[in-house]
Image (tube, rainbow, N blue to C red):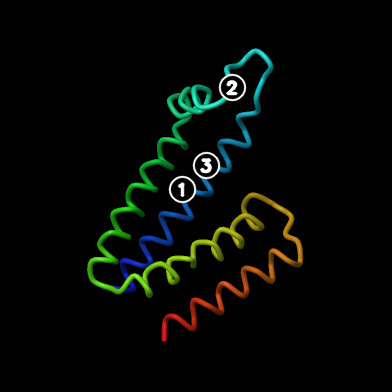
Amino acid sequence: MRWLLLFLVILFTVLADLLQSREMKRATARPDEIAGPLRVVKLILKRSYLLLSILCMAISFFAFLALVQTEPISFAVPASAGSFVMDTIFAKLLLKERLSRERTLGAICVFAGILLVAH
């Protein structure tokens, strides 16, 4: 059960992050628009992918709650950092983001840390 819950946490966190990034990049600010939190609320209501992102965050949150119910937090939090690694990979592949050498090395270090915690 531990690995299924961890998989759900990572999967839905990454989906939420990718959907948010995609939509917020598409929503460029115009000078006549309201700035700040009100603009974000307006965007959420107008863009279905942002609503889907919120749903993904909720699923990830509840899966994480179930994970920390059955596993030590010293495992759950570091292991869920797999979302950072997956975010980095998918940002490169799907969002066509440019990754610096330092960012790539950082993701590799996080992955190595996850492997250490998993044993």
Amino acid bearing label 1? Ala
Up-down: is 60 above or below 74?
Answer: above
Residue annotated with mark 3 = 20
Question: Pointer 2 and pointer 3: residues touching (CB < 8 Å)?
Answer: no
Q: Specify the quadrant of the image occupied by residue 66.
A: bottom left
**In the shown orientation, is residue 29 left or right of residue 82?**
right
Residue annotated with mark 1 = 16
Amino acid bearing label 2? Ala
Amino acid bearing label 3? Gln
For marks 2 and 3, give the CA distance: 18 Å
Estimate the x, y position of residue 4 in percent, counting from the top left: 31, 69
**In the shown orientation, is residue 8 left or right of residue 46?**
left
Q: Nearer the viewer, residue 86 or 70?
A: 70
Mark 1 nearby-residue class (10 Å; few <14, some 14–19, many ≥20) = many
Q: Dot 1 lies on which element?
A: helix
Front disc: 2 or 1: 2
Estimate the x, y position of residue 50 in percent, counting from the top left: 46, 36
Q: Dot 2 lies on which element?
A: loop
Question: Pointer 3 and pointer 1: residues touching (CB < 8 Å)?
Answer: yes
Question: Pointer 2 and pointer 1: residues touching (CB < 8 Å)?
Answer: no
Q: Dot 3 lies on which element?
A: helix
Residue annotated with mark 2 = 35
